[in-house]
Image (tube, rainbow, N blue to C red):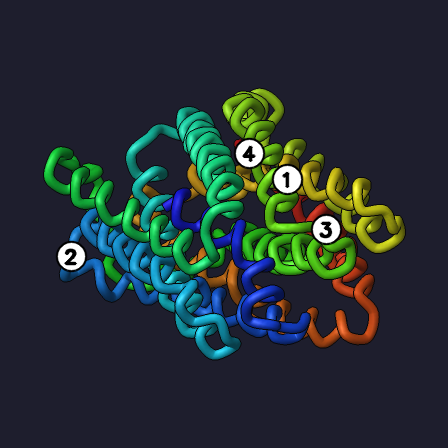
Amino acid sequence: MAVGFQGWRTLFNNFAVEEAGLNGLQVGTVQSVREIPGFLAVAVVFILPFIKEHKLAVLNVVLLAIAVGVTGFFPSFLGLMATTLVMSIGFHYYETLNQSLTLQSFSGIDTAMVLSKFKSVAALTNVSIGAIILGLAYLFPYKWIYLLLGCCILLVVIFLLLKVKIKEPGVPQHKKIIIRRKYWLFYTLNFLSGARRQIFVVFAVFMLVEKYAFTVQEITILFVLNNLISWQLNPYMGKWINRFGERRMLSLEYISLFVIFLGYALVQNRWFAGSLYILDHVFFGFSIGINTYFKKTADPKDIAPSMATGFTINHIMAVVIPVMGGALWLVNWRIPFLVGAGIALVSLYFAQKIRLR
C-alpha cells in the first residue's frame, strides 16, 4: 500500500500540472473525489458479514495497484478523477481495515508502539520508492512509471497470498454501524484531523509546485527527506505517547501545526516553505494518539465498526475542503493555510478534554 500510494502521491502534482494542465480548482476537485471513498468507509461494515477483514484488505490493495498502474494513460481532468477514485477506494478501505485489525490484535500499551513502527516501515518504503522515482523520472515518461508501480504491487500481493497464512483476531466484531455518545471526543478529533490533513496534503505540495516551481525531482527529494526523518523518529512516537500521554503529545502536534500553517501563509521563500513541509509531516505523526486514546476507552467488540465510523467522520470535511480551498486559492493562495491554522487551534482546545483513568 505504501508503494502504491506514495508513488501516486509523489507524481500526482507534477503530472497534474505538466501533463494534464490542471489549475488549483481542478486539483482541489480531484483531491475531493479522492476523499469520497474515505467518507464512505463506514460501508465496510456491511461487507464484513460476507468476507473476512484481512481478505477484504488484500482485495483493496489489488484495486489500488490497478488504478495506479493505469493513471498515466489518462492525462486529463476527467481521467484523473476516474483513476483517483478507484485508487482511493483501495487505499481508504485498506487503511480502515488495517487500523481495525491492528487495534484488535494488540494490547493497549503495545498499540502505540505497533502503530508507530508501522509508520516507520511505511516511511522506509517511501524512501525507497522516492529514490526509484527520482531515477526513473530522468528515463521514462509518467505513464510508464505509474504502470511499473502498479505491476510491482500486483506481483508482491500474489506472492504474499500464496506464501503467507493470516490468523484473524479472536474477538468477534459487531457487523453494524456503531455510534456511541461516549466516543464523542474520538469522533470530534477525527473530524478536525481530516479537515486539517487535507489542507496539508492538497495545498502544501501544490504550493511548492505552482508557486515555487519545484520540479518532480525536487518534490521527490523532499518526500525522501520526509520519510528518512520519519523512519528514524516514528518508532519513538509510540514510546513518547506511552510515557507522556495522548493529551500532551496531541497538544504538541496542534501547537506545531498552528505555527507551520502560519509560516506557509506569511513567509515567501521556497526553501523555508520546503522546510515547513518536512516539519509538517513530522508532527502529523503524533495523530496516532487519537487511535491509541480510542483503544484505551473502547469496548473490544466496537473496534471494527467504530474505526470505520471514525474514518468516515475523518473524511467529512476532507470531501469539502479541497474544492472550497481550491476556490479560495484562486482568490488568495494564503487563505487555505490560515484556515488550517484556525483548525489547529480548535483541535488544541478539544485535545485538552482527553482524560484516561
Instruction: Mark 2 vs mark 1: give the one in front.
Output: 1
Q: Residue under circle 2?
A: 51
Q: Amino acid at mark 4?
A: Asn
- Where residue 330 appears, x then y in whole percent? 77, 74
Instruction: State the count of labels.
Output: 4
Query: Residue 273's x, y, as percent?
Result: 78, 45
Mark before the other along the chain sequence, 2 or 4? 2
Which structural element holds mark 4?
Answer: helix
Q: Does residue 167 appear to the left or right of 105 in the view shown?
A: left
* Separation of marks 1 and 4 at Cα, in angstroms: 9 Å
Among the two numbered marks 2 and 1 on one chain, the one whose residue lies closer to the N terminus: 2
Which residue is the site of mark 4? 227
Q: Looking at the picture, which amino acid does disc 3 mark?
A: Ala
In the rendered view, does 127 fall on the left or right side of 61?
Answer: right
Picture layout, residue 16 above or below residue 271? below
**Between disc 3 and disc 4, whose residue precedes?**
4
Q: Nearer the viewer, residue 85 or 16?
A: 16
Question: Which residue carries the number 1 mark?
Answer: 222
Q: Nearer the viewer, mark 1 or mark 4?
A: 1
Q: Is residue 261 left or right of residue 42?
A: right
Is 139 in front, or is 58?
139
Q: Amino acid at mark 1?
A: Leu
Mark 1 / mark 4, whichever is N-terminal: 1
Visible residue check, residue 119? no
Give the quarter of the image for residue 66.
Answer: bottom left
Could you say which disc has been placed on residue 344 in the image?
3
At label 1, counting other C-alpha atoms closer than 10 Å, the crowd grade (few under 14, some 14-19, many 20 or more) is many
Picture layout, residue 354 above or below residue 109: below
SS at badge 2: loop
The residue at the point 65 percent across, 43 percent down is 218
Residue 277 in the image: above or below residue 114: below
* Cβ–Cβ under 8 Å for marks 2 and 1: no
